[in-house]
Each structure stands twice: as structure tokens, then as C-alpha cells.
Amino acid sequence: MTRHAVPGPKNTTSQTQPVTGLALVFFLLLTTLAACAPPWSTATPSNAAVQATASPSSTQLPGQQRWKEGVSSLLFGTNDTQEWSENNIETNPAFQANLKAAHFTLMRTFFFDHSLADNHPTSDAELEQRLRTVEQSGMICLGVLFNIFDVAFLKHVVSYAGSRCLLYEFGNEPDYNGISSASYLKQWNSVIPQLRQLNPRARFIGPVISQPSATEFLRAFLQGVHSSGVLPDAISFHWYPCWQDSESNCLKLADSAAEAVQSVRSLTHQILGRDLPIGITEWNFDPGNPPPAYGEKSDFISAFTTRALQAMIRAGLTFACQFDAASYAGYGHLDLFDVDTNAPRPQYYAMKNFIAQYYPSTTGGSQPTPTQARASPLISAGKPVFCSANDDGPGGPAALVDGHYGNWAFWHGTQRSLPAWCAIHVGSGPSRLLLVWASDYVFDYLSDNGSAPRSYTLAVSANSTNGSDGSWKTLVTVSANRARNREHLLPFTGMSWVKMTVTGVQPGNSEHEFLIDEIDLFDVSSQAALNDTFFCMGTSITALAFNRFDENRPALPDLVQAAYPDDFPALVNGGIGGQTSDGMLQQLDTFLALNPDMHYWLIEVGTNDAFGQVDPATYRLTLQRLVTRIKQAGHVPILALAPASNRSGDGDALNAELERLNSIVLEITQSAALMKGPDLYTLFRTHPAYLSEDGIHPDSAGIIAINRAWFDALRPYGLWQ
């Protein structure tokens, strides 16, 4: 752990924090350094000289993109270190959502073999929490393999994370923590080849020195890997230019990041004869514990942060991670979020505003280009399925993976036959699966009398042969379910089977039975694959539009697969008859809880509000709140224009109301910088034959047309390229 990150566990009952145990050791080490500033913190470089000599490596790291002006996307990272407060980046979804909304890109997360707080061994659940934190923050993983001498643990981490983490630093500040360059090099040459064999796609970074002036350690490392041939994929160091310096001097030193980068790059090129990507994986203004009080001044920290990032860009830096997100570092003074109030701190806003200057946010006007989605392969189609003897569904077990939704081929069970289970033999490979099940025999998304299971469990196995034998690990237990279509994210490293066991039916189901049409399993080992997911929220029009009985296809996922054969997006149909904008807002927390991993939220609303002649001002406020809350949850809302009516008698008046409400949708789409959804109003105004006899709801042709309209609206944004 870095020296300033160990204040001791946060005592929530007192503002006076003791420095004890390991924290005391670090505190004493810091005290011995207080008499003089580090030599690398005293010079302000010439910007012109740095610009003339910068030569960034062209090597592309996993997840790296080029943003505006060629800036590396990986410059905008932060750290998830040892947690010293119960409220932290790993436990607070709001912190994660804020990072995602601001387009932070790289999270450096520490894989400790033992906790620094109480020395307990790290569990797989803790590894999972760290990986999930990265993913829920919409970021790329940079893992710190902290204890370079615990080789078994390092190998376990790289195997467990799989494709979910493809960037690793080997150790942390070995020069500061008493590890000699010879010892570090010996471990590097021995361990890195083993880790590369475990995950050939992963990239390994060293030597993670505590400051750029640790040139002798860096020189010995570079000379050693040059001789051994076990070259790093990138070079990293840490940069805190101010040590108990004055406010004015510290601000001047913000520019020294460029000189630090150039000195490391020059030494690397001199010894290896080539450039490598360079990263500053911890940076902030001062490493004190706590740092100087002027760091709390918004004007200072905003100016320092902006100048530091500008210097990194000038120097052609490839990746960087501010220290830190929210772990109570420096007694909370280095965090991006206040762990007492949950409010973002000034440095968060400084980075957010800076990121906005370079994020590739426009295409064809003011609409944003979303983070590139990647195919989330549907891997369950046609897989072997085994069910318990009390399964009597038409079509047999294979109906669950036959690619048909509805159409009266399903897994069937009754109250008397419970518990009933079906297991799918997926095979090995994915480190994580997204499971989406569907029961399309009730109209509304939420119901107490439909055919969806009321309670069930999901389990995985590595050694079953027929679904009934082997050892099984239960990952999900659901009770009081009311949804007819639902998703679950399952860790799957080392596993090969998935089993769903139904234990209860809906209390209002007159037949006392459950029916499940399909269980889709998607390989979402990478976070980018999880972006390729859709929750469709709307009225009865949405409920019909995304009902995937064969006569209503091709649906949106079918259209995507036809254009991009390796891709079949996950989709959940959340339509509810009679739904209004206010009803959506009231039920939004339920929708979010049921679908935490659905990335894009396709929203069709307005028809029932028009029937009720809702006040336009109220409608605007409701939609704004709806959009804001979906964004805060880390998802991407997209609004469609409500379809025109062909209703006899009052069709013209209804359309006039719809036009007023649709104008508000356009305003919010513009002001909230949303992707522009389909114009269903014009679609049905010009194609009244797409409407059923009631003049409101689409017929089968209209259903297909709605799916095509969504596909055509979203395709230009590059979701599936």
C-alpha cells in the first residue's frame, strides 16, 4: 500500500482518528522524510522543451482509445485502495455511478493477499467485489498484484479475473517498501512468464516506483529485463510533487508531471532501445497524512488538477490514476468523494470538467457517442439441457435454449411438482455470465398472477454430468418475484453448468403453475460486453413491441445479429399496460433493482399521459427526474417519440396532445445530451396500417416496425461496430 493511504480504520463516532499498527509505521517513515522535499519536486519544466521531446508510445493497451486531439482515454483514472471507512467506493453505488457518469476510464484496484486493516486472508468474494466495483463504475481494470512473493495468490488472481482484468502492476512502490531492485527483478523474471501463460491477453507493468527520481531502481530494472528478455508491457511510477510545500509553490509544481514523464521515457528508451507506454498510477498534490489544509480549497485543487492533467497530455502520457476514489485516504482529504456526506469533492468536479473537454461526445451534432459496446455472445443456444423428472414442458428441456420466446414451447411445472430444476451445460471458458429468463404468457412486466416463477435459485457447478450430480454453488436466491422477464449476473470462473430451481409459483396464478420460455446465457467476461444490454420501459405499446413470439420477429436483437453476426444483445421487456410517466418514476427503483446490469434503457412513454391530458410542465419535470435517476444509476436512458394515433372519434385531439408531449421529449433529449431515440410518431402517422383496430396499439407489422425503428435510431451511434 502506498505510504499515505493507511490512516487506520475510520471511527465513525469521532472526528479524531488514531494512527495505529501499520499506519504508525508509515507515519514514522513519513516523519523522517519531512525535513526535505523530494528532489523531483523542485523544478518547473519548460513547456516548449517538453512538447518538443515527448514521444508517446504507439503501443495500444487493452481498453485504450484515442479521444479528442489524440489524447489517451486511460489518462482519466483513479484508485481503489485498502478501505479505511465502511462507506467507500466498493460499498457506495452512488460513488460508482458518479465516476461512470463523468467518464472516468481506469480504476487501479489493489489485490491484497491479506487485508492491511486486520491481516485476514483475501477471499474470492472480496476479489469479486473489487472487480464488480470497477465494472459498475464503467471503468477498465488495472490490478495491483500487491505481494509479489505470494506467487500462488497472484496466479489465483489472474486466473480468477480472466478477461475482466487485463492490466496488472507487479507490486507497489518496491523502492519505498524495502524491496531491493535485485529481489524485485528476480521475482519479475520468475513470476511474469507464469502469469502470461495463465492469461496471454493480460499486460504486465513495472516497476511501480514511488517517485520518478528513483532512477537507480528503474535503471537496474530496465537493465535486468533487457538481459532476461522478460520485458514489461508498460512502465509506471507515482508522482506527488509537493511535500508540505506552500500553496503557491505547490501549484507551480503541477507542471512538473511533464518533466517526470520525459525523464522516465528517456531512461527507458536509452536502455531498451524502444519506447513503452508510460503511466503515473498514483498522483495527487501531496502525500502527507493528512496533506496540507490548502488542498481543501476548491480554487487550489481545481487549478492543480487541471494543470497536472494538461502536463500529462503534453508529455504524451498513456495512463494515469488519481489517488484516490473514496477509501478515507489521507484521512479523507485525498478522496474524490466525502465518505461522511457522500458529496463529490472539488477534485472530482475538476476531473469531470476536464474529461468533458476530451471525451468524444459529439457525432452529427450535439448527441454523444457512447462507450463502444462489444458483442456479448449468446452462448446457450442449442446447449445440452437436463431437467428434473417432474418437468413436463412441451418441447422437452431443449425448448429452453431453442431461440423461441413464447410460441407454446416452454419449461412447465406446477405447485405440486416443486422444487423443479433445469440445468444447462454451458462448458468452460467464460469468467462471467449474464442470465436472462423469459416467461411471455402474461401481459404486464410485473404481476402476481402470471406464469413467471415466484421464487427460485440459480446455482453453478464445475463437475456435474447431468444436472443432478456433482457439487453446486448457489449464487442467487429470489423470493417474491413479480417480473415476467429478468436478468442476473453470475460469476463463472472455473464453472461449466448453470441450474435454475423453481421453488414457488405466483399466488394469483389460477393454474398454480409456472412457464419459462427461454433461458439466455451471455458471455460477459469483459465489461464492454455487458454494455450490450437493453431494458425496454414503456406502456402496453412496449409490452407488445418486445413480445418476441415468432410472428412479431425480427425483434431488435435479431436485427442486430443480422447486421453483426457475432452479436445478439440481451433484452428485457418492461412494458406495462396503462403506464404513465409518473407511474414509471414511482416504479423506477423496482425496475433498477431488478435490472442492475441493463446498460441502455429504451423508454416509450406519452400515450397514456396524453389520454390523461397531463400538464406539460408536470410531464417535463417527471421525465427530467426519470432521466436523471437512470443516469445516476449508471445507465443510459434513450427516449422515443410516442406513436401517433389513428383512433376514430378523438384521434386528432389525441395527436395534438401527443405532439405537445413529444416536443418536451425532444427538449430533454437535447438538454440532457441523450442519444436520439426513434420517431414513432411519424412512423405511425405515415403508416396507419401498422396500427390495430383500436387505432392505438401496433399489429404484428407495427411491432416489427417499432423494433426496426429502434435499430435504425441506435445504429448510427456505433453501439455494435
Image (tube, helix red, strand yellow):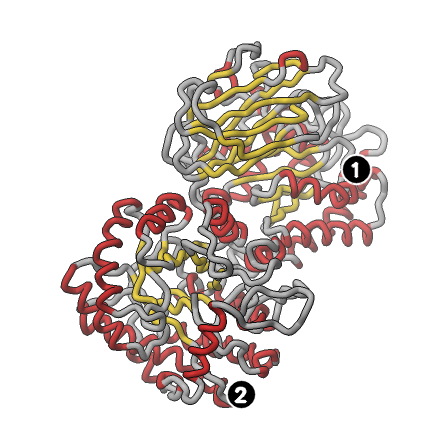
Amino acid residing under circle 1: Asn
Nearest the viewer among 586 and 512 is 512
Residue closer to the observer: 218 or 122: 122
Displayed quadrant of residue 38: bottom left
Which mark is drawn over residue 447?
Answer: none
Please say whether residue 476 is visible from this viewpoint: yes
> Where 565 sits versus 720, above or below?
above
Q: Is residue 270 above or below residue 550?
A: below
Ranked by sequence position, the earlier of labels 1 and 2 is 2
Q: Which residue is mark 2?
A: 247
Q: Position of residue 82 (x, y in %)?
A: 49, 61
Q: What amino acid is at disc 2? A: Glu
Where, by quadrant of the figure, is residue 680 drawn?
Answer: top right
Alpha-carbon span between mark 1 and mark 2:
59 Å
Question: Disc 1 designates what residue?
Answer: 608
Q: Give the residue at x 49% y 85%.
A: 244
The mark lying in front, picked from 1 and 2, is 2
